[in-house]
Image: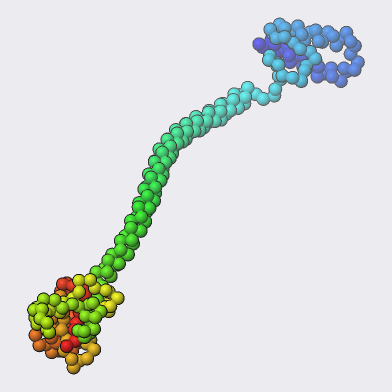
Amino acid sequence: MRHVRYTLAMIACSMLFGGCATHKMSGDQLARVAKDWSLSIRASQVIPVYPLTEDLQPGDVFLVQTPIEDQVKARKEMLIRVNSLVERARITAKELADAREKQKELLGENSKLRAELDSAGQRIADLTAQIERQAQSIALLQTHVDSLDKELTVARSAYSRAYYVIGREDDLVKKGIVVKEGGANLLVAHPGRMLLPARNLDRDLFQPVDIREITAIEMPDTTRRYQIVSRQSLDDAEVEQRDGAQFRGTLKIANADKFWAPSRFLIIVQR
């Protein structure tokens, strides 16, 4: 190796000192220089290339001015930087692996959350459909209840409907509201006959009232006596003056249900 260095140094010096007279060297001299250089290089087991090329090839020999100690120091510094870069790369790779693992975990959690959200969404859809069905059922029930309310109102109105009439006996007999029954059947008179309501009563001949609202019935003439000939009892009413089955003044009804219970038709005869 020392022989190669020495040979290279000699060739370099010859080329340097002879650089100024290059133009004076003949072709034979130039050929001899090339041959000597090739032989010296081949002796060092290196394939020579002359003239030198600009491309780098394996086995190229370079002449540098940097001392070997500086090169070793530079190589150590470079190795330190390379080791630092390698360590940093390892740390980065580990962080990247951890990040990927965390990403995988997050993706798994996201998948789980997505499945839970889908399940919750399905439950909400089912509940919404159930609520809609219940709303329809409630609407139908409300319609039925409204219909029942109307029917109940009509039934209550019909149940609370009552009728009364006040008149002289002859007029009531002529209208067919009352009849005389029973007693002795004599040629001139019929003693013992009773005045009773007719079996078939015409509502158009009566005054309609609502038993929930009417609490008193005024008599046309407060000086005359009146008598109830229908099935109601005078005991279930209040009057100003009473003489047996006859009374004077206003007929007050304190308990409508009890008073109208025997019949919804009230017939009062003026005496």
Q: Residue furthest front?
A: 187
Could you say which quadrant of the image residue 108 lies in? top left
Image quadrant where one finds the N terminus: top right
Residue 155 placement (x, y as % from top left): 27, 66
Q: Quadrant of residue 254?
A: bottom left
Q: Please tell me which residue lies in front, 189 or 178.
A: 189
Where is the C terminus found, in terms of image quarters? bottom left
Q: As displayed, is residue 148 above or below residue 169?
A: above
Residue at 36 percent across and 48 percent down: it is 130
Identify the coloring.
Answer: rainbow
Q: Is residue 76 left or right of residue 207?
A: right
The relative height of residue 137 versus residue 227 in the rendered view (above or below) is above
- Pick the front one: 168 or 50: 168
Q: Position of residue 99 (x, y in %)?
A: 47, 35
| Farthest-out residue, bottom | 223
Q: Nearer the viewer, residue 173 or 51?
A: 173
- The reply, left or right, for residue 10 in relation to residue 21 is left
Instruction: Look at 77% across and 10% down and name the residue there.
Output: 37
Residue 154 x %, y %: 30, 67
For the residue pair 46 and 235, the one nearer the viewer reads as: 235
